[in-house]
Amino acid sequence: MATAKKPAARTKKPTAKKPAARTKKPTAKRPLPAALVKRARALHEAAQARLIEQGREAISLIRERREAIADNYFDVGQALITLRSEAIAQALGYEDVASMLRAELDLSVSTAAKLIELATRVDRSLLRELQQERAAAILAVVDATEEDDTPEQLIAKPFRLPEGGSIDLRTAPIVDVKALARALRQQRASAKKAARGFSTTPADRKAFAALIAPVAKDKTLGGVATFKLLASREEHGPLVESRVPLKDYPRVVALLHARR
């Protein structure tokens, strides 16, 4: 029996290749109309002008308020000079000035003393310029120097640094001014330690304590008029350094004279 032949396998026709897709050339951007550019520029300039105006107004306001703060510090210091009287504290029903300050103003004696120092040692206009923190830092430098300087003298020209160079106390960062005061204090302390045998005697200190006792006991002058006994190599012996507010000077002189 004859077997049927299988039909021959069909051969696939080669598929025609598709032509490669053409890449579109980027179309050139058309420039914006001159009127639109002009309007955009005008809007930008107007926005900048508003920002400048807002910034200047804010800066002006802050400067005005800062001056008011400085004036307030000065006025508070002047008022505290009145309140340091034990007689006033007792008349108001308090045991002492410290109790009155804590109860009435939430102030410590040390804070009150700093405010009084600003009001008595720094001119109002200078305090307004420097502001409270810088003025206090400059006072610390004044107290740390060997010379009998004033804040006005120290800021009149750049201050010479011990290690060389100089610093403008008006514009330097306040942290640098405080660091300068600290360095000067350390320098003075080291110089005192290096001077062996350079000190006052017990008799000197006893005579000094007796001399200033009337001022130290005066309640209206407590903490304001200060005295310091300084050793000296001169023939006249130790020196007395004093810091007395001008308005209290006649009273201090009278107390010292009365002791004699």
Image: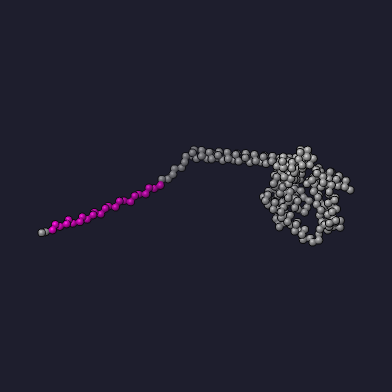
The residue segment tinted magenta is 3-26
Nearer to us in this view, 155 or 217: 217
Q: Residue at x 74, y 57 (%)?
A: 187
Q: Quadrant of residue 222?
A: top right
* Residue 156: x %, y % from top left: 74, 48
Quarter of the N terminus within the rendering: bottom left
* Residue 247: x %, y % from top left: 81, 42
Does 31 sit left or right of 214 as displayed? left
Would you place residue 141 above or below residue 45 in this image? below
* Residue 239: x %, y % from top left: 83, 54
Nearer to us in this view, 74 or 173: 74
Q: Residue at x 79, y 61 (%)?
A: 196
Name the residue furthest right.
260
Q: Quadrant of residue 75?
A: top right
Nearer to us in this view, 257 or 65: 257
Colour logic: one colour
Q: In terms of secondary structure, what is the magenta stretch mainly? A: loop
* Residue 60: x %, y % from top left: 64, 40
